[in-house]
């Protein structure tokens, strides 16, 4: 267990208890109450405190059942906040059902208000504790040590992505590999610490309780031994990193045809309500950005006239959904050498900054409005680079490409980018889109080259390490 984990869980328990007690005090201040006819023992100040403490303990018990105090579900993405809403809903719905079964009357307004205040109080409290936890990570607290099993290109890309103690709370200690000698340096000072069949011994030696397995990077004997270790429920947690086959076959649905159990593989796509909400978000934000785009195009056109001419827009052919070809737009940089002084030089510098910066692809909101792209999605694949993205191209073309996405700003290898993009499709939610948009805005304002370090814990860990 990482240093400080017990303190974090105790802090969460104490914080949840305090905000639940405070929410019940606020319910009483509004003149509402849960029980329509409370017994005499629950009357008065001491009775109210006793009832509030009992309710807080009950709700926290439901939270615990929903893994809201389980370390693996904390400090990562929106799952924790969604779990708060789900846990509060389960708790108060179960309370209402139990009251009907035993014949105890509940005050409806008090029940609804208690549920709402629980969600509105516990969620922000956990947000504050997350900020504290992220600061503690800079001092080495709440950081999990792990080994990557398999040192091929996929394993190296995975280690680069996960090795972020301050951001993801993960520290890669080294590698286990069948095909490299022990002690071989493979990545940024990280070495091969042993072979996979000595995993337990190496984990104990380096105080590691977690391994991420790249299945196609080890021998079948090592793979069998590690899977047996995981199945036996050992002290070490074994996770399997996704390859293309795992991502495409994720979320299988069992079916039974006669006596033979079969598995139906769910399609890799965004559909239903998620697809509708995604399109609504695209249209609303694209329309809101149109005036800014018009002003930017006018400014770039004027700058091009002042610095000596040249095209304002560049056009390249790119692959869209289902392999369709569309024109990818970009603001052009200056086409001449830098003028010597005056207004022409300022115009030249403006065009160079816009053409080489992130605002250069803003004209593609026209493609968003036309339905060829989305604001968030997999990275755009230009037609001339299609061969570089094999065998990922088919999977990436199942949804519209995006102006930004989980691989935005990344200079990693194609396989690493494609893993993030395909996993984005598999784990899509509107909340994920909003978080990626916010991260992209923060990246532009702070002039960062990648996503903020405290931001993509869910995508880096849950997408790259937990998908099996």
Image (spheres, helix red, strand yellow):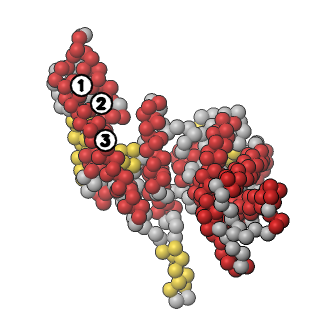
User: How many numbered marks are there?
Assistant: 3
Of the 4 image quadrants, the one containing the C terminus is bottom right
- Between 365 and 40, the one nearer to me in the picture: 40
User: Which residue occupies 37% across, 52% down?
Assistant: 281
- Asked which secondary structure carries label 2, the reply is helix
**Circle 1 residue:** 334
**Circle 3 residue:** 289
- Asked which secondary structure carries label 3, the reply is helix
> Mark 2 to mark 3: distance in Å?
18 Å
Mark 2 or 3, closer to the camera: 3
Note whether 135 is above or below 383 in the view shown.
Answer: above
> Mark 3 to mark 1: distance in Å?
24 Å
Q: Position of residue 458 (x, y in %)?
A: 56, 50
With 449 as the anchor, is 457 left or right in this view?
Answer: right
Q: Earlier in the sequence, mark 3 or mark 1?
A: 3
Rate crowding at label 3 as few (under 14), some (14 to 19) or many (20 or more) other CA atoms within 10 Å: some
- Asked which secondary structure carries label 1, the reply is loop
Rate crowding at label 2 as few (under 14), some (14 to 19) or many (20 or more) other CA atoms within 10 Å: many
With 414 as the anchor, is 332 left or right in this view?
Answer: left
Q: Position of residue 80 (x, y in %)?
A: 61, 54
> Mark 2 to mark 1: distance in Å?
8 Å
Rate crowding at label 1 as few (under 14), some (14 to 19) or many (20 or more) other CA atoms within 10 Å: many
With 325 as the anchor, is 404 left or right in this view?
Answer: right
Res 227 quadrant in image: bottom right
Q: Earlier in the sequence, mark 2 or mark 3?
A: 3
User: Which residue occupies 31% across, 51% down?
Assistant: 283
Q: Position of residue 127 (x, y in %)?
A: 62, 45
Res 156 quadrant in image: top right
**Disc marking residue 355:** 2
* Label 2–label 1 contact, CB within 8 A: yes
């Amino acid at each position: 267990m990482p240093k400080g984990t017990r303190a974090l869980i105790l802090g969460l328990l104490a914080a949840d208890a305090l905000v639940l007690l405070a929410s019940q005090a606020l319910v009483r201040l509004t003149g509402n109450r849960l029980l329509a006819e409370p017994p005499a023992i629950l009357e008065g100040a001491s009775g109210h405190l006793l009832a509030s403490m009992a309710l807080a303990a009950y709700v926290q018990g439901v939270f615990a059942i929903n893994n809201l105090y389980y370390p693996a579900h904390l400090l990562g993405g929106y799952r924790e906040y969604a779990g708060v809403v789900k846990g509060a809903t389960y708790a108060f719905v179960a309370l209402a059902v139990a009251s009907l079964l035993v014949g105890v009357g509940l005050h409806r307004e008090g029940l609804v208000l208690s549920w709402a205040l629980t969600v509105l109080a516990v969620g922000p409290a956990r947000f504050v504790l997350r900020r504290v936890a992220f600061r503690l990570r800079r001092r080495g607290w709440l950081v999990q040590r792990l080994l990557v099993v398999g040192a091929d290109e996929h394993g190296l890309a995975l280690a680069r992505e996960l090795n972020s103690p301050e951001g993801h709370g993960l520290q890669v200690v080294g590698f286990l590999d069948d095909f490299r000698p022990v002690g071989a340096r493979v990545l940024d000072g990280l070495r091969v610490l042993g072979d996979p069949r000595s995993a337990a011994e190496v984990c104990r030696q380096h105080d590691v309780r977690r391994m991420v397995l790249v299945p196609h990077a080890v021998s079948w004997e090592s793979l069998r031994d590690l899977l047996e270790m995981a199945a036996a429920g050992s002290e070490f947690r074994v996770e399997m990193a996704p390859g293309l086959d795992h991502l495409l076959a994720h979320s299988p649905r069992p079916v039974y045809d006669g006596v033979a159990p079969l598995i139906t593989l769910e399609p890799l796509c965004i559909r239903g309500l998620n697809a509708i909400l995604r399109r609504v978000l695209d249209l609303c934000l694209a329309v809101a950005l149109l005036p800014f785009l018009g002003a930017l195009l006018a400014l770039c056109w004027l700058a091009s006239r002042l610095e000596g001419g040249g095209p304002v827009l560049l056009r390249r052919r790119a692959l869209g959904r289902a392999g369709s070809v569309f024109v990818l737009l970009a603001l052009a940089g200056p086409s001449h050498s830098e003028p010597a002084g005056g207004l022409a030089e300022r115009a030249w510098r403006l065009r160079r900054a816009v053409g080489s910066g992130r605002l250069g692809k803003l004209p593609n909101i026209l493609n968003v409005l036309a339905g060829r792209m989305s604001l968030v999605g997999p990275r755009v694949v230009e037609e001339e680079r299609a061969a570089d993205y094999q065998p990922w191209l088919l999977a990436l073309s199942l949804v519209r490409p995006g102006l930004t996405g989980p691989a935005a700003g990344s200079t990693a290898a194609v396989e690493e980018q494609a893993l993030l993009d395909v996993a984005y499709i598999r784990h899509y939610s509107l909340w994920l889109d909003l978080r990626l948009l916010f991260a992209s805005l923060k990246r532009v304002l702070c002039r960062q080259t990648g996503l903020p370090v405290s931001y993509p814990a869910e995508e880096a860990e849950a997408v790259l390490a937990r998908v099996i």
